[in-house]
Amino acid sequence: MIYMPVTSTAHQQMSLSSRGVVKWCASILNRIVAPLQKGNGPNKFQLSSIETATTTYHGDVGWANRPTAVIECPQCEADITQPVSSDRIDCDRCRARLPHYDFPEATLLYFQCPSCGSQMKHGKRHPDEFEIPEWATCSQCRYHWEFEHSYS
Ligand SMILES: [Zn+2]
Ligand SMILES: [Zn+2]
């Protein structure tokens, strides 16, 4: 390697070019940020950025703390909302009534996020052992519900 003495002109050139890089970066950044600030669904972007800033992780555990379930009525196929897992499953349309323990036989359409009201994704961890969902997660606000803490 050869070490060159840094002359005053070389030093000036270096600082000039680094200033140019800063300017270039700023213009790239403007181009990336600008479309997010105006047009193209700004609400969605602002919402998610607020959510991620204020809430890191929140959720509940246990069947009693389960999110509101939306179930398909076995008689008339209307949507039945069951906010609490120990509530009877009552259809407002055809008056069908199911006891809460018939939940596994009912068709679960989705869980409703208690935090933001979105439809949640749900699933099972042990399909052979459980007839009910063991987790549900909200892709909008990241609320997560888990049937049990952990499995050994
Ligand atoms: Zn019904
Ligand atoms: Zn949510």
Image (tube, helix red, strand yellow):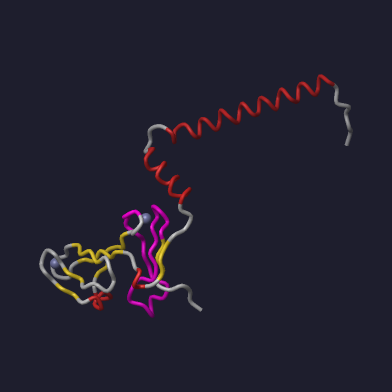
Q: Give the range drawn in magenta.
A: 116-143
Residue drawn at (13%, 71%), measured in percent from left and top? 96
Q: Is the magenta stretch mostly helix, strand or loop?
A: loop
Residue drawn at (74%, 25%), measured in percent from left and top? 15
Q: Does the magenta stretch include residue 73?
A: no
**Could you say where residue 30 lies in the image, as x and y percent from the top left?**
52, 30
Specify the farthest residue to the left: 94
So how many labels did they put on this image?
0
Residue drawn at (89%, 33%), measured in percent from left and top? 2
**Could you say where residue 142 lies in the image, as x and y percent from the top left?**
42, 56
Q: Is residue 120 magenta?
A: yes
| Residue sitting nearer the eye, 82 or 74 | 82
With respect to residue 42, does 60 lie above or below? below
Q: Please state, as top left, top right, bottom left or bottom right, where the N terminus lies in the image.
A: top right
**Could you say where residue 123 lies in the image, as x and y percent from the top left?**
38, 67
Q: Dividing the image into four quarters, tell me where ligand 1 lies.
A: bottom left
Q: Is residue 62 left or right of residue 56?
A: left
Place residue 70 in its image quadrant: bottom left
| Residue sitting nearer the eye, 56 or 73 | 56
With respect to residue 119, does 69 lie above or below? below
**Could you say where residue 49 lies in the image, as x and y percent from the top left?**
45, 45
